[in-house]
Amino acid sequence: MDALGVAQFTLDLDDDTHKLALYDNTVTPNFATDQSYSTSGEITGTGYTAGGLAIASATFTVTTSGGTFATWDGNDVQWTDSTLTGVRGGIAYADGETPKRLILGIDFGSAYTTASGTLLVAFNASGIGRVNVISA
């Protein structure tokens, strides 16, 4: 699968207009056909605006220590003073593109709820997405 191939679209992963939108458990991604942001299954609630929040300070790096790795990273995302129910995952997408291309999906493993609290999506220290690049 060539999800980020130049043949499909050009995507600047350093762009700070990329967002993380939250979804419930009704979303079943179809990586063969789902191509852009959708409100279907998106969370609603106090403190959440459709479309989610920006992933600030986005970076894209390639490192060659211990192999070749392409890494996309950015700041953690949080919804403060929120009342949300059934938050099962998130989808990062390119908000500055037309259409708003999907970048990756995150399954939180279980549903989360806030009651006038904070929902924090803390990305892994190794990055939001990391790929081991292997040449054939």
Image: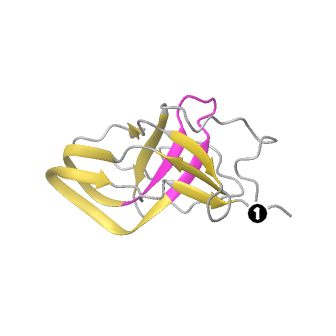
In the visual, does 91 lie left or right of 135? Answer: left
Which of 83/64 is in front?
Answer: 64
Q: Position of residue 104 (x, y in %)?
A: 56, 53
Question: Which residue is disc 1 drawn over?
Answer: 134
Other-residue count near label 1 (Cα within 10 Å), few / some / many at <14 / 14–19 / ≥20: few
Instruction: Work out whether 46 lies above or below 67.
Output: above
Residue at screen point 63% across, 29% down: 98
Reply yes or no: does residue 43 show up in magenta: no
Give the residues drawn in magenta, as a range: 88-105
x 58%, y 60%: residue: 29
Q: Position of residue 124 (x, y in %)?
A: 42, 59
- 83 vs 53, nearest the viewer: 53
| Residue 6 shows in the view | yes
Among the 4 quarters of the image, the one containing residue 68: bottom right
- Residue type marked 1: Ile
Residue at image location 58% in from the left, 39% down from the top: 13
Residue lying at the far left in this picture: please name it: 116
> Which residue is more in the foreground, 117 or 2?
2
**Residue 26 in sight in this render:** no
